[in-house]
Image (cartoon, rainbow, N blue to C red):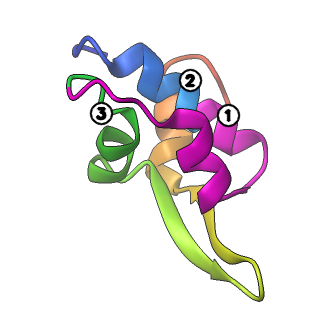
């Protein structure tokens, strides 16, 4: 981890890794008004999380294999 936001990205990926979350819950929980804290966008851009359709529930967010590797590499195994 090298960027200042990496610990927060790690927290987000770990939180989603515990169980897939609804997109609306992720955005509600992890939204920020600070343009320097782009945690959600960083996780998506790095390919650590993905959005998938969830029948009748909107979008579901889950970690990707890259996200699982990010957790393992940072001693938060999934």
Task: Locate residue 28: give its quadrant.
Answer: top right
In-image side of 6 versus 59 (left or right): left
Instruction: Give the residue number, with chain letter if any, for mark 3.
Output: 38
Left or right: 18, with 27 as reference point: right
Task: Tell whether label 1 touches label 2 (CB within 8 Å).
Answer: yes
The quadrant of the rendering that contains the C terminus is top right
Q: CA distance from mark 2 to mark 1?
A: 6 Å
Along the polypeptide, which appears first: circle 1 or circle 3?
A: 1
Distance, label 1 to label 3, CA atoms, is: 16 Å
**Highlighted range, magenta:** 14-35
Q: Residue at x 23, y 13 (%)?
A: 2
- Residue 41 painted magenta: no
Residue lying farthest to the front in this orientation: 33
Number of numbered tags placed on the structure image: 3
- Residue 55 in percent (x, y) is at 75, 88
Q: Where in the figure is residue 71, as x and y percent of width and height?
A: 55, 30
Q: Which residue is mark 2?
A: 11
Estimate how packed mark 3 is, as few (under 14), some (14 to 19) or many (20 or more) residues with alpha carbons within 10 Å.
some
Residue 70 percent across, percent down from the top left: 46, 33
Between disc 3 and disc 2, whose residue precedes? 2
Q: Residue at x 51, y 68 (%)?
A: 51
- Residue drawn at x 34%, y 29% is 33
Residue bearing mark 1? 15
């Amino acid at each position: 981890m090298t960027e200042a936001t990496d610990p927060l990205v790690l927290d987000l990926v770990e939180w989603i890794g515990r169980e897939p979350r609804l997109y609306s819950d992720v955005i509600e929980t992890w939204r920020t008004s600070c343009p320097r804290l782009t945690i959600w966008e960083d996780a998506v851009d790095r390919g650590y999380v993905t959005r998938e359709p969830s029948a009748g529930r909107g979008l579901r967010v889950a970690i990707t294999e890259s996200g699982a590797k990010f957790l393992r590499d940072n001693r938060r195994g999934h």
